Image (spheres, helix red, strand yellow):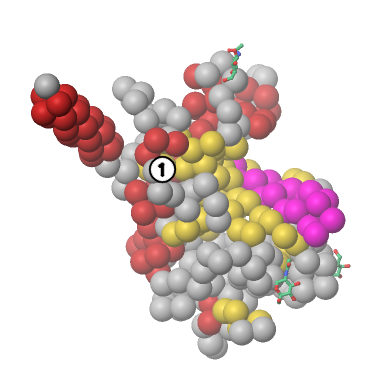
Amino acid sequence: MNLRISVGWILLVFVHCGLWTAAEKAVELANSHLLPPGGYRRLMNLNAEEYPRDCSEIFHQSEENASDGLYVIQPAEEPIGVYCNMQDGGWTVIQHITANSTVDFDRTWQDYKYGFGLVNDNYWLGNEYMHQLTSSPTLYKLRVKLVDLNAQVKWGEYEPFHIEDETSQYRIRLGLYKGNAGDALCQDTEAYLHDNQRFTTKDRDNDNYFQNCAKLEYNGIPGGGWWYDACAGANLNRRNVIYWQQDCNKTHMCKYAWMMVKPVDHSQDCSKICPPLKDEL
Ligand SMILES: *[C@@H]1O[C@H](CO)[C@@H](O)[C@H](O)[C@H]1NC(C)=O
Ligand SMILES: *[C@@H]1O[C@H](CO)[C@@H](O)[C@H](O)[C@H]1NC(C)=O
Ligand SMILES: *[C@@H]1O[C@H](CO)[C@@H](O)[C@H](O)[C@H]1NC(C)=O
Ligand SMILES: [Ca+2]
């Protein structure tokens, strides 16, 4: 009797584990290294039949009632896990940093390509996935959100926003700016211009400086990967100083930054005929 119960238990446990493993394997996220422990269970749409291409699609499919959290999206062939900020139309978070957190942003080209950190925490989604996300026929916009030590929030948006492919060294293309923060990527007081720059990491120097900007240290912490000019009017990837010119710098410290993307909403902007898009972004 006792023996039979035990065998039953063992079988039950065995079957459960088997199913669980199968469910995890069925998805195979390309960026599973960005999931926290037990992260598959925290993906809110893990068992959906089809994955949306971004968080905005999830927001609209949920009749604008989806909550913030971890979701699976599929911008190209491979499903990936991301953090969705479901305020204001559903934003796909591509970067989040907390000043002085333990997540290391001083990383190689390969790390910046496929992402690092954890999607429920500080992370870089990956240049390859940023390229995939922003390469649809629908244009995307970028929102930067900055929070200083007094919890004051600043933001800025570039529309459109596009990351080119790896053969172009993940060059950044930025459109028109709006926001209550300064336009630190395109209008630097020191004449550094980030628009149209290629990405630089400590092991791949594509910047316009005689040394590698990603290796330049402030208080012992290197700049990290970024779209440097002959260095920076803004850099959100230096671990100890979030830099956005007049809004976040060494004397006016910020605690948090986010970068997130969303499709451009043309229905709002032009009710009649959309103007032709410029050849060059
Ligand atoms: C919105 O979501 C919440 C929590 O997920 C749920 O309780 C509520 O019923 C939903 N409302 C609508 C209108 O779907
Ligand atoms: C740093 O930020 C403060 C406050 O936002 C600003 O007044 C100051 O000019 C900035 N410093 C530099 C060097 O840009
Ligand atoms: C980060 O750490 C440095 C060194 O301890 C400190 O000076 C700085 O104020 C910290 N930054 C924030 C935003 O807390
Ligand atoms: Ca250089």
Q: On the rendered image, what quadrant is the N terminus found in?
A: top left
Task: Tell me the residue that label 1 is attached to.
Answer: 39
On the rendered structure, is 251 left or right of 51?
right
> Where residue 98 sits in the image (x, y, percent)?
64, 59
Task: Please name the residue shown 59% across and 20% down the image.
Answer: 65
What main secondary structure does the magenta stretch of the protein show? strand
Span shown in magenta: 139-158
Q: Quadrant of ligand 1?
A: top right
Task: Please name the residue shown 60% across and 64% down the image.
Answer: 101
Task: Please name the residue shown 83% across and 73% down the image.
Answer: 251
Q: Is residue 253 magenta?
A: no
Q: Amino acid at mark 1?
A: Gly
Where 179 falls versus 64 (above or below)?
Answer: below
> Where residue 108 sits in the image (x, y, percent)?
41, 72
Numbered-mark total:
1
Where 160 falls versus 20 (above or below)?
Answer: below
Disc 1 element: helix
Task: Please name the residue shown 82% across and 67% down the image.
Answer: 252
Viewer-nearest residue: 154 or 36 = 36
Residue reaching furthest bottom? 210
Viewer-nearest residue: 150 or 9 = 9
> Where residue 223 sits in the image (x, y, percent)?
58, 75
> Where residue 75 sits in the image (x, y, percent)?
39, 39
Q: Is mark 1 within 8 Å of ligand 1?
A: no
Q: Quadrant for residue 127, please give it.
A: bottom left
On the rendered structure, is 28 left or right of 31?
left
Residue reaching furthest front? 1
